[in-house]
Image (cartoon, grey):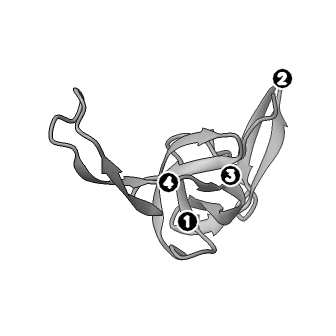
């Protein structure tokens, strides 16, 4: 499995699309798509169910392509690279060279 440059919990900034400029925390990463908190919200009409007895209109985030977001390090966007740290592969911020995790 390829290591993703963006992971759950990262702060990212949307660089293109209708939500360009918005920042948020990554809720999940799956199949080249990311779910970002408060970004790309959609309106969904839900029928009443056991989980939601009243049904109604629900506002939730929709996934956006991972290529449309950029990692934010200390308030600035940066590309993410990989570097070997001994036997371990670590993510680095390309702008500063700092190890992310």
Q: Which residue is mark 3?
A: 98
Residue at screen point 55% across, 65% down:
13
Viewer-proximal residue among 91 and 63? 63
* Mark 4 vs 1, N-terminal side: 1
* Mark 1 vs 2, N-terminal side: 1
In three-dimensional space, the C-alpha distance between marks 2 and 3, rounded to whole angstroms, equals: 18 Å
Q: Which residue is mark 4?
A: 62
Q: Residues within 10 Å of mark 3 (few under 14, many from 20)?
A: few
Q: Residue furthest top?
A: 87
* Mark 2 vs 3, N-terminal side: 2
Viewer-proximal residue among 39 and 72? 39
Tell me which corner region of the image, top left, top right, bottom left or bottom right, holds residue 93. Answer: bottom right
Q: Which residue is mark 1?
A: 13
Q: Position of residue 42 (x, y in %)?
A: 41, 60
What secondary structure is found at the residue carrying circle 4? loop
What secondary structure is found at the residue carrying circle 2? loop
Q: Which residue is mark 2?
A: 87
């Amino acid at each position: 499995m390829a290591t993703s440059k963006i992971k759950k919990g990262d702060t990212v900034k949307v660089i293109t699309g209708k939500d360009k400029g918005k920042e948020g925390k990554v809720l999940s990463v799956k199949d080249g798509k990311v779910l970002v908190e408060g970004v790309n919200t959609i309106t969904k009409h839900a029928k009443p169910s056991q989980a939601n007895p009243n049904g109604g209109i629900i506002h939730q985030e929709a996934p956006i392509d991972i290529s449309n977001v950029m990692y934010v390090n200390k308030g600035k966007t940066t590309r993410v690279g990989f570097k070997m740290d001994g036997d371990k592969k670590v993510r680095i911020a390309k702008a500063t060279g700092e190890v992310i995790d």
